[in-house]
Amino acid sequence: MALTPDAPPVSVGVLREHGAGERRVALVPEVVGRLVRDGLSVVVEHGAGEAAFFPDAAYEAAGATLGDGSAVLAADVLACVRVPDAGLTASLHRGQVVVGLLALGGHAEEAHALADAGVVALDLALLPRTLSRAQTMDALTSQASVAGYRAAIVAAEAFGRFFPMMITAAGTAKPAQVLVLGTGVAGLQAIGTARRLGAQVTGYDIRPSSADEVRSLGATFLQLTSTPAGAGEGGYARELTDDERAAQQAELAGHVARFDVVITTAQVPGRRPPVLVTVETVAAMRPGSVVVDLGASDLGGNVEGSVPDERVVTPGGVTLVGAGNLASELPTAASSAYARNVAAVLRAVVREGRLDVDADDEVVRAIRVPPAPDTAIADPAPIEGATA
Ligand code: NAD
């Protein structure tokens, strides 16, 4: 990212995030300092880092300038966490680059607004996870890891008993029994955190390769007999058939009721999250049990009855936590990791001090929307069940 003599530095803008409940910020002062030393200029909207505990003064000390929204929107590259709403996008200019966890597959209106404005969107939600070169850019992983940690903390906080075994003069408390359904990045982090809090933990996933990962964390792997292995392409899970899903739900129902805490993280890329815990299964759980549904969103979640960003106590005394955006609840850690992912993307598209979004670069090719210069946007792969 060395600066070309006489060329104006490539400017990077950081907006204050507008999404409801969003506390993360796309760049943090430490990373801004590195970008400025590399020859970029960074303009940060007043208060952009406030909710993540990064004050304006820290950005200034790192070499950024502070500005209002319009100054930020004029930058060559706009770094954001979530997709800017279509109103903001209207003031962007042709050739500008927007980098973020845009999830354009679920945001058709914003995707079209960006394409209409001639903006090049680099959607980190499309990043190929298995390319080793892309690992430093892998915001899905960094944010899932934060969310998984937070899920265990939220569960412990909502649970009316201890997670660890407690031996006191007043008697002995048994350790909490925790079940984690879906043991990808977030699930493994939830397992590790629940174990560190002293719970006895069991994990389950339909990808057979995850069993060893679960056991390596000192947890027990739950082996279902009714559901065939569900490994799909690229290390992800495949979607189960209706019959497989029904069999899985029925067999899981027999296990779930003996756990105090259930944390669900199951996802299938581009699809609605699978329902793993039905209303009947929740009704069979003991009063005081806690279920944290990390997959809860407007598309539905892994747990029937969970509501995104809400905590519901069922008539049977089970607390359902619909955990919509858990990474945002740990905004300092989530933003710090995310900023390093964004900086890695910037390193790939700023060469010798010039903005150069190379359409032949395999990473750029995978995350760029629209895919090539002057190509009208094809509807980005929609998430099944999403509305525009
Ligand atoms: P994800 O968020 O897509 O899904 C979470 C978990 O849910 C996955 O483990 C998946 O197998 C599981 N799941 C889906 N449907 C299920 C069902 N019906 N029942 C039970 N479990 C179900 O996954 P992720 O956390 O993004 O990870 C996906 C894969 O990518 C994993 O294999 C992970 O190790 C891999 N990965 C690799 C890299 C890398 O190589 N750099 C980085 C990140 C993730």
Image: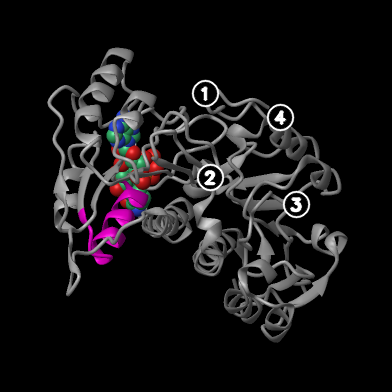
Q: What is the distance, in whole Å, between disc 1 and disc 3 at their CAs?
A: 29 Å
**Residue sitting at the far top:** 243
Q: What is the distance, in whole Å, between disc 4 and disc 3 at their CAs?
A: 16 Å
Q: What is the distance, in whole Å, between disc 1 and disc 2 at their CAs?
A: 18 Å
Q: What is the distance, in whole Å, between disc 2 and disc 3 at their CAs?
A: 30 Å
Q: Residue at x 24, y 38 (%)?
A: 205
Compared with 116, 60 (above or below) is below
Q: Quadrant of the N terminus?
A: bottom right
The spot of residue 278 in percent (x, y) is: 36, 26
SS under mark 3: loop
The reply to whether dot 1 and dot 3 touch (C-beta < 8 Å) is no
Residue receiving disc 3: 96
Question: Which numbered disc covers residue 384?
Answer: 1
Label whose residue precedes the other's in the sequence (2 or 3): 3
Residue receiving disc 4: 376
Q: Is residue 182 left or right of residue 223?
A: right
Residue receiving disc 2: 324
The one of 365 and 167 positioned closer to us in this rendering = 167
| Callout 3 crowding tier (Cα within 10 Å): few <14, some 14–19, many ≥20 | some
